[in-house]
Image: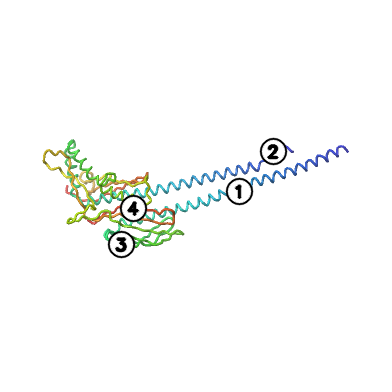
Amino acid sequence: MTCAIILKVDVSEMRLDRSKRSGVTLVEIMMAIVILALAVLPVIGSFSKFYGTASRQLEQETALKISEATMNKLMSHQYSELVTGASFSLPLDFRTPEGVLTGSLNFAGSTGNSGPVKIGNVTYNITAEVEKVFIAQDILTPHPNAMELKYPIDPPPVPPSHDLAAIATYSCSDDLIMIRLKVNYGGPKDVELMSFRADMSR
Amino acid sequence: MNKIIAQKRGIAIAVVLVFCVAVLGLVTILVMNTRFHKGSHNVQFEQTRALMAAKAAMQLAIYKFRVLPSEFYKLHEIEKKLRADPSNSLLINKLNAFVDIWNKDFDSDVPGSPADKINQRMNSIDQIDANNRHSFKVVEFKLVSRKNKGYVKDYIQIRSSGKYGNSEKILEELIEVTIVH
């Protein structure tokens, strides 16, 4: 009889203990869910941010490749057309890792525009500007905006000149240009390149 | 039995903490990866601008040679004399002075030179900040004569350097010329 009573007490204690245990586990799960949420939500946010950054970088790199290829085309295009501001169309056909760009840079005056050109989902807009940085020298009415090139000459053999070389100046009779290229891809900053081009037709 | 149950308490938190650490590690790797790629784009951008500067120097150098070819050949004449008399210090100094005068037009760091004016225009691009600026010069401008170098033809060898930010690009061109030996 005594033994039975003791056993009864033990079972009720065990029930009590099990119920206590279940409560603690629920709290643990809730805490775990809260901690998980705290950890995972920013991670999901970061993932989308990183994905956005990665795609923007890809677009920037493609814009850079396009601007470099277009600049190369302009550096080898007929100089007289660029310097006189003639209307002409420069065909653009570039293969980029993102796809093929097919379009043309249409010049009117000193500026050219490709209009919107699509590669995949991204729209690129190429603009070019030609500006004269040196103006051809006019012998009758000289001006200071011509390119002046210096070259060595033998010093006049008049004592007491001990110069190893004297300097003469040649004032150039060509208009010389700068080419400014801008590629807009919808990003925060356009890709801009600039270079100098001289008349090589001599 | 109670002891065993008591020991199991807190396992969930430990597992979650391990999971969080793993997720944080993943995020760190992602951040590092993104930064690395961002850096590589900047390097590409700087290198392209440096290349444009080197091209500008090359254009200027070729143009000068085209408008003043006979003036450049004077250098060749001095070199020829120097080959006959290699220890002539006056000729050596004269050659150095000639090369210095000839190359100054291509150096964007020489105030008032054509290169300086071109460089100022290149640095006027809207996005250029004070730390990242173009600069360029011609590193080498010489006549490579077939008579002395074993070439079949004669060439003008031009090597130009363009800089932007921390990047530098070197361009080299050989222009075929005909000279009287």
Q: Which residue is mark 3?
A: A109
Q: Chain of mark 2?
A: B
Dot 2 amino acid type: Gln
- Figure quadrant of residue B79: top left
Give x and y (percent) for residue A155. Answer: 15, 42
Dot 1 amino acid type: Ala
- Check disc 4: other Cα within 10 Å, few if <14, some if 14-19, many if 20+: many
Q: Which residue is mark 1?
A: A37
Query: Do the residues marked 1 and 3 share a common chain?
Result: yes
Whether tag 3 and tag 2 are in contact, CB under 8 A, the answer is no
Q: Which residue is mark 4?
A: A194
- Figure quadrant of residue B141: top left
Q: CA distance from mark 4 to mark 2?
A: 71 Å
- Figure quadrant of residue A66: bottom left
Q: Which residue is mark 2?
A: B7
- Check disc 3: other Cα within 10 Å, few if <14, some if 14-19, many if 20+: some
